[in-house]
Structures are given as structure tokens and as C-alpha cells.
Amino acid sequence: MKIDEIVDSLAPWLAKHRRPAWKPVVVEGDGSPTASKFCGTPWIGPDSPWPDCSVCNHPLSLFLQIDLSDLPGELGGRFGTGLLQLFYCTRDDCQGYGGSEPFADDLSRVRVVHPSGPSVAVPRSPRHKHLPAKQIVGWTRFDDLPTPCEHDELGLVYTYNFENGTLRLECQELNFDVTSRMSECPAEEIANSEPGDKLAGWPAWVQGVEYPSCPKCGGRMTHVFQLDSQNNVPFMFGDVGCGHITQCPEHKEVVAFGWACS
């Protein structure tokens, strides 16, 4: 079977696993301290101070702040309320000390804060690298699909025969079982996750499925936001890596950030 025939045959599976996702619409500038934004100045409170890098002790840079109460209605408040904030160290001297693993908290800090008053004024420091701010003023919806490394768990199984150059695809729920030439049936053309910065949807994993487990309940955390290298934040995670913020669906204050590169 050719790739277009396979995709047509798998239409019910694709429809089942299609998820809404949103690309941020941005304008140049910082906005208010509680605005959704890339970089710029975050809301900072007495109980939520500006975090420092655990390696160099210099202030971390704000990479992302999202007002969880002001997200597309289709999400139904899935991520709770408050401001989701991600800070990261941009100092060259600190790269290579970690920062890629969820809950590492050495080069990064991700948290949910609940503003209860005006933001505390934070003086600009020569030690703090300020990145150009972009305010998020809207969201553009699209349909997202899982990356191939998640297909097996979702019921679409790939069996490669490298000696013969063939690929067997099985989907039991559809009674689908075909064998094709590998060159004629790349998994990425069946279903793949959208790269770039995005809210919700499916993670575009770089090295494999890496959902962290909640340290409180042990449950799998869910994808909240994908932050790609050199998109809205002028920073590269490793060698053009891609980062993901995840959240425990039961304990919404438990959030994590990790990234991977090829």
C-alpha cells in the first residue's frame, strides 16, 4: 500500500488521537507584569522572588509567562489558574551543567504563582541578561497529532525488517495489518507532532517519549507548552533542542520543564 492509502485506512485512528493545539500570536513589547509573554519582566511577589541559577547564582532569565486563566475556552480550565512561569539561565558558563531533566532545578525554574497584589519592583541588575519581550495577545488553533514514538502505545505498531527493507503496520482496533516498503511508508507522514512553540497538543519529542512522573502521586504528567529553540525566545537548548513544560493533572501546582536535542 502507498502512504496515501495507508493514511486513508487509518482515518479513524487519526481522528481519535487528534488534539487541539494553539500557536501563540505575539507582538513586540512587555505588557503588564501579569501578561502572558515570552521574556520580559514577570510578576514577582514577596513569596515568589526572582529565582537564581543554582550553578552560578546569577538571576535566571524569564523565558515564558502564561496567564492560565486566560487561555482558549476549549481547554476548559484544564491547567488551572495562576501564572505559569519558566525561568532559565542563559550564561554560557553554565551550559553543560544539566538543566535538561525535569525537576533538575539547576539551570531552570518552572512554577505556578498566584498574584495577590502588585508585582514587587525588581531593579535591573548587570548580572541579569534581559531578552527582548514579546507579549502573547492571542492563540491560533490547529489540530495536532502524536509523534511516531508514541504510536505504538496508542495502538499503531511498527515492525521493521531492515534486511528486506519492509515495514509492517498493525492497528488491532481497525483490523489493519499491511506490509509496505520502508521507503514508501515513512512514519512521519502517517502522523507527526507540530514543531515550534505551542500550547497543548502533542509533544514533538526529540529522543523519545519523556513524560515525567508526578513526585506526589506517581502519575504521568501531561503536556502544557512546547518551547522550541530560537522561536520566540532567542536561545538554543543544546544543539537545536526542544523543551516541554508538563503538569500533573491532579496536582496542578506540580509542573516540570525538560528538553532534549538530537
Image: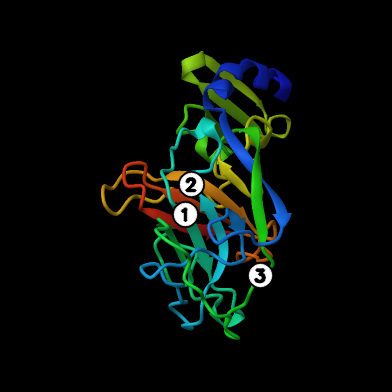
Residue at 58% x, 80% y is 124
Residue at 58% x, 53% y is 36
Mark 1: few/some/many CA within 10 Å (<14, 14-19, 20+): many
Q: Mark 2: which secondary structure?
A: loop
The residue to which callout 2 is attached is: 68
The residue to which callout 1 is attached is: 83
The residue to which callout 3 is attached is: 131
Residue at 66% x, 22% y is 7
The answer to which image quadrant residue 232 occupies is: bottom right
**Residue 168 in picture, x, y percent from top left:** 58, 27
Please name the amino acid that badge 3 sits on: Leu
Tell me how far mark 2 sits from mark 3, CA to CA.
22 Å
Please name the amino acid that badge 1 sits on: Leu
Tell me how far mark 2 sits from mark 1, CA to CA.
6 Å
Residue 116 appears in the picture as rendered: yes
- Mark 2 / mark 3, whichever is N-terminal: 2
The answer to which image quadrant residue 222 occupies is: top left
Please name the amino acid that badge 2 sits on: Leu
- Mark 2 / mark 1, whichever is N-terminal: 2
Residue at 66% x, 20% y is 6
**Residue 45 in picture, x, y percent from top left:** 42, 67
Quarter containing the C terminus: bottom right
Q: Are marks 2 and 1 in contact (CB under 8 Å)?
A: yes
> So how many labels did they put on this image?
3
Quarter containing the N terminus: top right
User: Which residue reaches farthest left?
Assistant: 217
Q: Mark 1: which secondary structure?
A: strand
35 or 256, nearer to the observer = 35
